[in-house]
Structures are given as structure tokens and as C-alpha cells.
Image (tube, helix red, strand yellow):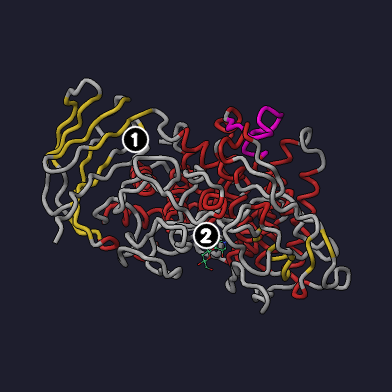
């Protein structure tokens, strides 16, 4: 048979922070001597020996680790190991700042109801799609005040993913995570701009972008009773066309408890954030506050209205029948919004464990918000919140340390959107480090960021447009239909997972290798707003001093 191509040295293709941990993975069963050579001088600056080789089960790969954390001088380098192709890398004070801007700019590219002008979108400029000003109430959502077929307006917002629909629960966690990035990194975002139409107005670009979606979310509540529709959608997914060519009729589908609680939590958080911007956004904090409370009240009266996909609808379900975490998250946010004790009591009564956040599992988000406002808790409550976060963070540290790759990803983490699992785990570690700074938290966090940016079994920087090798054929209708060769930049591909539900051609079934850079692969190569958000958060976290 043909000779195996030589294995590649695996590095973070976007680079390493001057002060941080710097690891490369050397595939193979042997320990190796490695050296780091400064460029362009060619001067050797560091020589070391890799760790003992170990198996990383999710990839079925035996590897050793080259640790060059001691090198802290910014610049370009070449990593050399005898028998392997050398690889170039950079060490910089802010290696991820440009990448950050692209990852948040991706949301602008997915805006509904707006033309993308060349001044902001470059070669990816396109006509506006989906005005969403004539949306029909679907039979599943009919009420006395809004019977089936009632026409309502629900413009703006971001397309969810590679498809053009807008789903409340997924939009909610996305919006929360971006608002949380604002809360945690205000100094960074007060300065940072990335050329969107609103740049240079009197709001931070981050909040302008988030407002594009909040204005849409706000329309997803039935003003008559406070219930929130689960999604705004076509009946079926569109073909591979540009947004303005996707003109199928759209509907508001079924009010659900999950959507109402998610909406309540996000609107409560948004109201708190916007109360600092009353002059720029008059009345918005008050509106969102009132909407949050009404959504909570609807959910309290309708505690188990689960999403049930109507027979004539086949788009993403985002169905969830376990809502104690949604209740606890919303309770935490409503307490922080109103200061009313019963909400906080409910949060603690529900006693949901903090876990890696996802659209379906949101308990951690309530802990994050409460930990940030620890002054509004009693010492005992504070302890409960802090230890719930630390407990999970410590598990991630153990996973990091035990893994041959020095990446806190275990087999169960390779689900649909595994790269976002990595980023949401990293956020939890960051939160733990905010509470009690520990080098081990930062190392595990860096390991996860390294993983999505190239230190992985596929040698792939999973963000479009960045790194030595990055996805070219994401499952993203505009990227496929626009006639531009390069995909829209800044999107994090969903990532490896062994489900292969799309039935595309994959070259491996191993959890960390089951990925296909093919438009057909919606199960491994789609992009989604809820996957980019924790990436944005982490890249912002790494673009400024981290508590030590
Ligand atoms: O992220 C979602 C994942 O957790 C589910 O397993 C999967 C199948 O239901 O759906 C994913 O979300 C998709 C949504 O349903 C429709 N828009 C694209 C989303 C990303 O693939």
C-alpha cells in the first residue's frame, strides 16, 4: 500500500500567549528531543524532551507532549523534531485579538433583515434576506388574540446556523454568553471595534451586535399572555440558496416553557446590562425587564409545555423535556434583576448541579451570574455558588491532566457541536479562576483553546479563515451559495463527533476524528451562533490580563 503521510506536529495555529502554557503534541510512541528556533535568525532558543507517550482514547492516538512554556519572548518560531516536518508558531502578548474580531463579526454576517454592504462585508456583501415583517401564527401557536394565520412582525435577529431559521432557546444562550462577555470584559469591549454599520456610534460594537438579536427576541413574546414562541421558521429547511432567495413562508411555532424561561433569563440579563445605557437606548431596559417578568409568570403557570414538532414542520426542534435547569437559570437572573428573595430561594431549592453549558443544559449560567454578583448573596449562599462551579472545574482539571493530549475532552464530550463543548468547558474554568485563581485552571483552559485552534488529531484550526489549515466547506448556506471560494470567516465548525447523522463520507469513526470538511456534513461541519459565542468569550478572555 501507499506509505502513510508523515504525522504532523500539532500546535495552536493562532499562537501562544507570552506568559501562558505552551504545548505541542508529537504523534507517535516515542519520546523525542525537540527544539524551538527563533525566526528569522534561526537561533535555537529552547531544547527539551517530550513527555512519555500515552494513548488518547478519543482519537486512538499515542502521543507525547513538548512543553516550551518557558519561552516567553514574543516572536515567530519553528518547532523542530527529528523525523517530523517542522512547524511554525508565534508567541505574542495578544495572539487571539484578530481572531476574536472575526469570531464576533461572524454574527454580523448572519444578520437577518439587513443588506450586508461591501464596506462592512467585503467580498461577502449580499442583499438583505428575510424582512420577517409578515410572519404567520402557526396552528400550534394559535391563541384567542392571535388565531392561526394572524400576521405579525418579527424582523432582525441572527440566522441560527447554516440554516435561516431563528430559534429562541438557542438564540438565548448565545445572547446570554455574549452579554456575559460584555459583563466580564468591559474594558476590552469599550475600546474594540470590528467595522459593523454601528461602529463609532455611542455603544460598544458588542452591544450593538447583541441588540440586533435582542430586538428580534423581544418580538417572540405574545404580548397578550407573556408566553414565548419556540421558533420562527420555514416549514422545511431551504435549499442551498442565498438569504434573499430563501422566500418560503415563515411561521411562529408553539409557545413553550423552555422558550419562555430562556427568554426570561436573557431579557433579565439584557435589562441589567442596558440599564447602563439608558441615554443611548431609552426605555429598553424597562421594556426587557417587564418582558422578562411576564415570560417568567407564563412559565410558572405553564410549567411543562414541552416543544412538540408539528407534523408539517421539519426544521430544528431544539426540544428539551428537562427544565429544572431553565427554571433555576431564570430564577437566578430574575433575582439579580429585581432583588426579590423568592427567586433566589427557588434557585437554591432547585439545586441544579453546574455542568458544561449548552442550549439544553443551562444551569451553569445561573451560577455564573450569581458568582459575579456575589455581594447579593449571603456568605453561605456564596459558598454554595462558588463550590458548585469549582467542583466541575476541578473535574475538568483532572481530565486535562489525565489526557495524553493535555485537553480536557473525554469521549462523552464528542457530541454534535463538540468544539462548543470545549469552549463552554473553558468558560467554566475561567469562572472558577475568577473565584479562586489557580494555574491548573488556566492550563486546562489554554488546552481547550489550543484544541479548537489546531492542537487536535486533525491538525485543524476549526475557525474559518484562520490558521494553517481550516474548514473550507462549512455547512453554511451563504458560504456555499455565494460563489466566493473562501467561506465566510470567523465561524467555528461544530467539530468531531461519531454520530455521523448526515451520512456523509467520513474517514474515521473515532470520536475526536469523526469530522468531514464537506458541505453535506451538517452533523460535524455546520456552524452555529451558540457555538461561536463561547469562542468569542474565550478569545476576549485571553485578550486581556487574566486573574492570577
Ligand atoms: O446543536 C443542535 C444539536 O444539539 C442537536 O443534536 C441537533 C439535532 O437536533 O441540532 C443541532 O442544532 C441545529 C438545529 O436543530 C437547526 N439549526 C442548525 C443547528 C446546528 O446544527
User: In the displayed structure, would residue 499 be above or below residue 213?
Assistant: below
Residue 153: x, y in percent? 81, 56
Label 1 sits on residue:
16
Query: Mark 2 or mark 1, which is nearer the start of the sequence?
Result: 1
Queried whether the magenta region covers residue 443, the answer comes back as: no
Seen from the viewer's position, the closer of residues 2 and 433 is: 2
Question: Can the viewer see residue 151 in this picture?
Answer: yes
Q: Residue furthest right?
A: 145
Residue 178: x, y in percent? 59, 45
Question: Can the viewer see residue 379 in this picture?
Answer: no
User: In the displayed structure, would residue 419 be above or below residue 498?
Assistant: above
Q: Secondary structure at mark 2?
A: loop
Q: Which residues are magenta?
A: 193-208
Q: Secondary structure at mark 1?
A: strand
Q: Main secondary structure of the magenta part?
A: loop
Queried whether the magenta region covers residue 200, the answer comes back as: yes
Residue 204: x, y in percent? 65, 33
Amino acid at each position: 500500500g501507499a506509505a502513510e503521510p508523515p504525522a504532523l506536529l500539532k500546535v495552536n495555529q493562532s499562537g501562544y500567549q507570552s506568559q501562558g502554557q505552551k504545548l505541542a503534541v508529537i504523534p507517535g510512541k516515542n519520546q523525542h528531543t525537540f527544539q524551538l528556533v527563533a525566526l528569522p535568525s534561526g537561533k535555537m532558543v529552547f531544547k527539551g524532551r517530550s513527555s512519555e507517550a500515552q494513548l488518547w482514547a478519543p482519537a486512538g492516538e499515542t502521543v507525547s507532549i513538548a512543553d516550551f512554556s518557558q519561552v516567553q519572548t514574543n516572536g515567530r518560531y519553528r518547532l523542530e523534531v527529528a523525523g517530523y516536518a517542522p512547524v511554525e508558531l508565534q508567541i505574542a502578548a495578544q495572539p487571539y485579538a484578530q481572531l476574536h474580531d472575526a469570531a464576533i463579526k461572524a454574527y454580523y454576517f448572519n444578520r437577518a433583515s439587513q443588506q450586508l454592504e461591501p464596506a462592512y462585508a467585503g467580498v461577502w456583501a449580499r442583499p438583505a434576506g428575510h424582512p420577517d415583517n409578515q410572519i404567520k401564527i402557526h396552528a400550534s401557536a394559535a391563541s384567542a388574540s392571535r388565531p392561526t394565520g394572524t400576521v405579525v412582525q418579527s424582523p432582525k435577529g441572527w440566522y441560527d446556523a447554516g440554516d435561516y431559521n431563528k430559534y429562541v432557546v438557542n438564540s438565548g444562550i448565545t445572547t446570554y454568553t455574549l452579554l456575559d462577555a460584555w459583563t466580564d470584559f468591559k474594558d476590552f469591549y469599550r475600546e474594540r471595534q470590528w467595522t459593523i454599520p454601528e461602529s463609532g456610534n455611542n455603544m460598544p460594537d458588542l452591544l450593538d451586535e447583541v441588540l440586533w438579536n435582542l430586538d428580534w427576541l423581544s418580538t417572540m413574546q405574545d404580548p397578550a399572555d407573556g408566553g414565548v414562541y419556540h421558533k420562527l421558521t420555514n416549514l422545511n429547511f431551504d435549499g442551498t440558496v442565498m438569504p434573499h432567495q430563501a422566500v418560503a413562508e415563515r411561521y411562529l411555532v408553539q409557545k413553550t416553557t423552555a422558550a419562555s424561561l430562556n427568554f426570561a433569563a436573557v431579557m433579565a440579563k439584557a435589562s441589567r446590562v442596558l440599564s447602563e445605557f439608558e441615554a443611548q437606548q431609552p426605555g429598553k431596559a424597562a421594556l426587557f425587564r417587564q418582558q422578562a417578568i411576564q415570560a417568567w409568570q407564563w412559565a410558572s403557570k405553564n410549567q411543562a409545555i414541552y416543544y412538540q414538532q408539528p407534523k408539517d414542520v421539519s426544521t430544528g426542534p431544539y426540544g428539551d423535556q428537562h427544565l429544572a435547569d431553565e427554571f433555576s437559570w431564570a430564577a437566578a437572573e430574575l433575582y439579580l434583576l429585581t432583588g426579590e428573595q423568592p427567586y433566589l430561594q427557588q434557585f437554591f431549592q432547585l439545586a441544579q448541579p453546574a455542568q458544561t453549558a449548552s442550549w439544553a443544559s443551562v444551569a451553569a449560567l445561573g451560577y455564573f451570574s450569581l458568582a459575579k454578583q456575589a455581594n447579593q448573596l449571603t456568605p453561605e449562599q456564596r459558598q454554595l455558588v462558588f463550590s458548585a462551579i469549582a467542583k466541575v472545574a476541578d473535574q475538568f482539571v483532572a481530565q486535562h491532566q489525565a489526557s495524553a493530549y493535555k485537553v480536557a475532552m473525554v469521549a462523552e464530550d464528542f457530541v454534535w457541536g463538540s468544539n462548543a463543548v470545549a469552549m463552554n468547558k473553558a468558560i467554566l474554568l475561567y469562572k472558577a479562576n475568577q473565584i479562586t485563581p489557580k494555574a491548573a485552571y488556566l492550563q486546562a483552559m489554554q488546552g481547550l483553546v489550543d484544541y479548537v485552534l489546531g492542537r487536535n488529531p486533525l491538525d485543524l484550526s476549526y475557525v474559518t479563515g484562520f490558521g494553517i489549515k481550516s474548514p473550507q466547506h462549512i455547512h453554511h448556506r451563504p458560504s456555499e451559495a455565494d460563489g466566493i471560494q473562501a467561506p465566510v470567516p470567523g465561524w467555528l465548525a461544530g467539530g468531531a463527533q461519531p454520530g455521523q447523522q448526515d451520512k456523509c463520507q467520513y474517514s474515521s469513526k473515532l470520536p475526536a476524528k469523526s469530522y468531514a470538511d464537506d458541505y453535506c456534513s451538517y452533523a460535524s461541519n455546520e456552524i452555529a451562533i451558540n457555538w461561536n459565542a463561547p469562542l468569542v468569550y474565550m478569545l476576549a478572555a485571553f485578550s486581556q490580563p487574566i486573574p492570577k
